[in-house]
Amino acid sequence: MKKFEYRVLPIVIKDIDKLSNTLRSHLDHEGYNGWELVQWSIIPPSAFIAAMMTPCCNSILILATFKKEVH
């Protein structure tokens, strides 16, 4: 039976104009380290208050879940 380790990574994108480059660099970095993207979610600004997080205005918060097989 395969066993996996999971990890949730918050990705804050501060410059909307560089959204794709910033997101791709984060995903590439994790991929090079053996992590596979399982799912991602964009967190709405209204959730920032509940999570006690206050990213700068015009920023986007993405929660990405990754997995890696444990040997």
Image: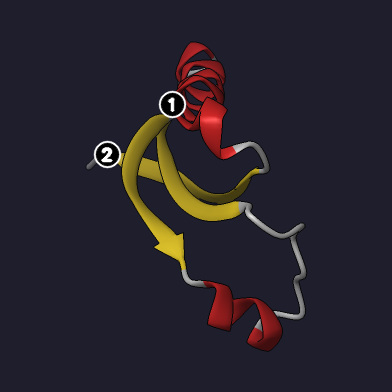
The kind of residue on which mark 2 rests is Lys
Residue 14 vs 8, above or below: the answer is above
Is residue 1 toward the left or the right of residue 44 in the image?
left
User: What residue is drawn where x is 31% and y is 44%?
Assistant: 38
Q: Residues within 10 Å of mark 1 (few under 14, many from 20)?
A: few
Q: CA distance from mark 1 to mark 2?
A: 33 Å
User: What residue is drawn where x is 65% and y is 76%?
Assistant: 48
> Which SS class for mark 2?
loop
User: What residue is drawn where x is 46% and y is 48%?
Assistant: 64
The image's mark for residue 20 is 1
Residue 70 placement (x, y as % from top left) = 45, 33
Q: Residues within 10 Å of mark 2 (few under 14, many from 20)?
A: few
Q: Quadrant of the C terminus?
A: top left
- Which circle, 1 or 2, is nearer the viewer? 1
Q: Quadrant of the N terminus?
A: top left
Q: Looking at the image, which is closer to me, 2 or 34? A: 34
- What colour-coding does the image apply? secondary structure
Residue 4 vs 68, above or below: the answer is below
Q: Looking at the image, which is closer to me, 12 or 58? A: 58
> Which SS class for mark 1?
helix
Pointer 2: what residue?
2
Residue 41 vs 11, above or below: the answer is below
